[in-house]
Image (spheres, helix red, strand yellow):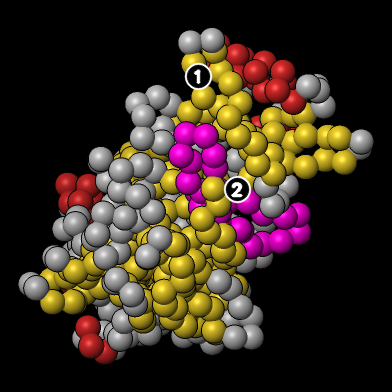
Amino acid sequence: MLKRLISIILLGVLLSGCSFVQLGTEDLLTPPSLTKDQSEIYDALRSALGTENFKLKYPKRGDYLSAFVFHNLDTDSDLESVVFYELTVNSVSSVWMSILDRSAQGWNTVYDLPLNGPNIDFVYFASISDEEKDNLVLGTSTQGSDDVSVNVYDYNGSKLTALYSGSCAEVLFADVDQNGLEEIVLFTRSVARPAVAKLVKYRSGRIVLVDEANLYSGVTDYFQVRYDTLANGYNAIFVDMIVNGTFLTTQLLSAGDAFITTMSYEEMGIYENFERPLDSVKCADYNGDGNFDIPLTTLLPGYTNQSEIDDMYLTRFMGMKDGKLGFVKSAAINKAGGYMLYFPDGWVNKVTVIPQPESGEWRFVVFNKDLEHSTQELLRIKVVSKSDYQDKFADSNYVLLEKKGALEYYVHLTDSAVSSPLAIEFSRLGDLFTLLTA
């Protein structure tokens, strides 16, 4: 069976203080039309229930967003259908899941199960208890709760059996011990106490908690949880988390057959503080070597963390370099504009950024004593929306660098840069400029 090495399901609002209303498909004014199979399944379900008082329920996120999910849950070669719906009896509503199988006569309801929450957060399939077939994993939640209940089921062709249920703020599925079965790592949040990462795995016929590790105190949300490569042949769990709703930080975890533990940064040769502003980027492969890099931030020249102006930061990426951890790249990141500009080595500690909010520009200047005296510009980057074409700036010195959706990115290499040893040519910008993907 083809194994998935890693899978992640994000389960919450990424940034504290930011909220949004996420409408389910059932909230749409016009529900999506059903396919032929879905229509037949709907009719079979209605016949089995003996009532019209039900409506389809849709998962909020993940790879499966339909009320009808098709997957082979047992050891035969046929797909089963998992259907989610809200049933109302005597004015009381409850959410159910039904498993339907197809025979020569059509679709038939095989098993029905009430769910322990009115909201279906995600649907996932993984070999957790048996290498030969997939388990059904369902995330559910109750109104007003930020946590999700992670439920693991086994289907044997006639019955759905609950194998495990655990609550968390974030969940990761990964084969951390490389034994062919995926483990579950549950992450809690806590204001007053350390958050906890819990390793759950199949052992001796049961899915059980085998170990846990403390994270930071005051974890209010998770920005990203990822199982990936830190160095060739070495994997780690990267946890980007929000602490007290005020800053972002990263912890690395190591997990195996029966343990999960916080990795010591000092043992890896890291002596930097991973705390960074909320609008920082997450861990990812930023230098394209196949290994995950960890972002760290430092104030750009001229910014003191004590002035009335908004501070600007240089993000330095720590990753594998010549077989050991070191700084691989540095960049000024414009989250609002959706781009980053990597700094040439000669720019670090010598070049700073002065934003121009009124024009949507960032000015990259040679630092000279303070921001007021830093007047020698090397380049400008401007973000322009197509909807603003009627007010588009008229300056032939700006050259289109990149496009993304309705946004266009222009660069202006200023005349004052010509005499500077820090000047860069337009041909180099293709390697230095990149759009943010998340």
Q: Is residue 288 above or below residue 195?
A: above
- The span picked out in magenta is 137-160
Can you give x and y, in whole percent of width and height, for residue 159 in the image? 54, 39
Residue 220 pos. (x, y %) = 60, 73
Between residues 343 and 424, which one lies in front from this camera angle? 343
Is residue 158 a member of the stretch shown in magenta? yes
Q: Residue at x 82, y 40 (%)?
A: 93
Q: Which mark is residue 23?
A: none
Q: How many marks?
A: 2
> Is residue 265 among what the camera can see?
yes
Which amino acid, by three-letter code, is at mark 2? Asp
Residue under label 2: 121
Determine if residue 34 is in view: no
Residue at position x 43%, y 36% from top? 73
What is the residue that sits farthest to the left in this orientation? 322
Q: Name the residue rendered at 30%, 43% in the picture.
A: 132
199 in relation to 424, above or below: below
Quadrant of the image occupied by residue 259:
bottom left
Q: Residues within 10 Å of mark 1 (few under 14, many from 20)?
A: some
Q: Earlier in the sequence, mark 1 or mark 2?
A: 1
For this rendering, which residue is in front, 61 or 370? Answer: 61
Front-most of 253 and 333?
A: 253
Quarter holding residue 217: bottom right
Q: Nearer the viewer, residue 386 or 122?
A: 122
In the structure shown, which secondary structural element does the residue marked by tag 2 occupy?
A: strand
Query: Where does residue 30 sit, x and y in percent of width and height?
Result: 72, 21
- Label 1: which residue? 102
